[in-house]
Amino acid sequence: MGKAIEAQGLNDIGFTMAGCLGFCNSGPLLVVYPGGIWYRVTTPEDVDQIVKSHLKQGKRVDRLVMCSSEVRGVVATT
């Protein structure tokens, strides 16, 4: 994750690792705030796409979205 962020020159974005966020059987996961978009990632290429599209361009990567606090009725909790 850090390498992907650095490669895109996004020096103002921070990230942290966490344990189970309530979806342990669905992992690995990546959650983007603000917005609370939960992504299910399976490859390093997925991470690269999220960094390029979502973090750099502000475009959600719909094919990887697991859930979102923006979606009515879905609440992401820790």
Image (cartoon, helix red, strand yellow):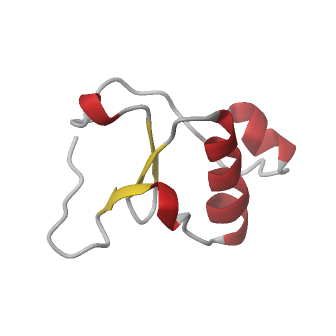
* Residue 17 sits above or below residue 11 on the image: above
For this orientation, the residue located farthest to the bottom is 72
Q: Position of residue 5 (x, y in %)?
A: 74, 44
For this orientation, the residue located farthest to the left is 73
Position of 49 with respect to 26 (left or right) is right
Q: Nearer the viewer, residue 42 or 74?
A: 42
Quadrant of the drawing holding the N terminus = top right
Q: Nearer the viewer, residue 69 or 50?
A: 50
Q: Position of residue 51 (x, y in %)?
A: 68, 52
Q: Give the total of numbered labels.
A: 0
Q: Residue at x 77, y 51 (%)?
A: 10
Q: Residue at x 46, y 57 (%)?
A: 33
Position of 5 with respect to 21 (left or right) is right
Q: Residue at x 62, y 63 (%)?
A: 54
Q: Residue at x 78, y 47 (%)?
A: 11
Position of 12 with respect to 8 (left or right) is left
Q: Position of residue 45 (x, y in %)?
A: 69, 42
Quadrant of the drawing holding the C terminus = top left
* Residue 50 sits above or below residue 14 on the image: below
Q: Position of residue 18 (x, y in %)?
A: 40, 27
* Residue 3 sits above or below residue 61 on the image: above
Quadrant of res 19: top left
